[in-house]
Amino acid sequence: MNPILLAVIIVAGIGILAGALLAVLSKIMAVPVDEKAAALEEVLPGANCGACGFSGCSGYAAALSGGKTANTGLCAPGGNEVSAKIASIMGLAAENIEPMTAVVFCQGNSDNANKKMIYSGVPSCKMATQLFGGEKECIYGCVGLGDCARECPYDAIMLCDGVAVVNPDLCRACKRCVNTCPKKIIGLVPKSQMSAAVLCKNHDKGTLTRKECKAGCIGCTKCVKACPNGAVSMDNNVAVVDFNKCTACGACVEGCPTKAIELLHLQYQ
């Protein structure tokens, strides 16, 4: 037999045998597909933000399908529409999701916050924080280098004069900015509820805070005394508003000498 033809036959035979072996092994070692989990993952937004408490959309889908949770309302980015779709697939009652938005609790822009140095390193809040807490005198405030804006998958955050600002119309409350901020000054508040908020996280005493930022909370407690609903309290030298008690009457806003408190709906106009 022609040596070339023999070689071709041998190679072809090996290929057929290997293909048959792979086909058999693929059946034996096949991983069962969870069709319900696949259907759930299909209706989830795919942000993989972890706001649901699981490892992304696939993790939430697997948890629902596997009975680890029956809560259809854990996907904040998907909102009530996704909650309804999950409920339809699972045969459950749809949980209501209250629309939330992220808020940056800081007003340390160039007009308000003093600087102790000029930072010229890697343009990252996380990196700048490693160097004496950043270039601003206030070590609690927004670094302003945009880690949160780069992390946001919905383009809901922009930098305005050295401070991050959230557009509530675009925010989907995925918490990626909350988890990314090295100063932990970003939090979630209800979109539907007008409320006062202390836009400061400075825990220094009042005399030092005044030197660091014009719009910082100096812990004078005037807002606490002014609130008729007991919605304002002090926490380690900084005022805090309880959104569940606040009626947005504006009494604390009027009483704050440094204008560290604002009505949230006024910020977004």
Image: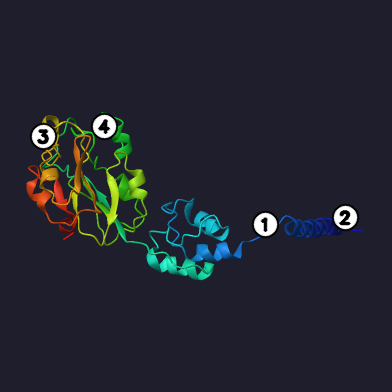
The label nearer to you, 3 versus 4, is 3
Q: Position of residue 149 (x, y in %)?
A: 30, 50
Q: CA distance from mark 2 to mark 4?
A: 76 Å
Where disc 2 sits, the SS reads helix
Q: CA distance from mark 2 to mark 3?
A: 92 Å
The label nearer to you, 2 versus 4, is 4
Residue lying at 56% horizontally and 58% vertically, measured from the top left: 67
Q: CA distance from mark 4 to mark 1?
A: 49 Å
Amino acid identity at mark 3 = Arg
Tag 4 or tag 3, which sits nearer the N-term? Answer: 4
> What mark, if any, has residue 3 been given in the picture?
2
Choose top left, top right, bottom left or bottom right for residue 145: top left
Q: CA distance from mark 3 to mark 4?
A: 18 Å
Which residue is identified by label 4? 133
Q: Is residue 86 above or below residue 154?
A: below
Which residue is identified by label 3? 210
The label nearer to you, 3 versus 1, is 3
Residue lying at 50% horizontally and 65% vertically, measured from the top left: 42
Residue 143 is left or right of residue 32, and the answer is left
Residue lying at 10% horizontally and 51% vertically, measured from the top left: 251
Tag 3 or tag 2, which sits nearer the N-term? Answer: 2
The 10 Å Cα crowd at callout 3, few under 14, some 14 to 19, many 20 or more, is some
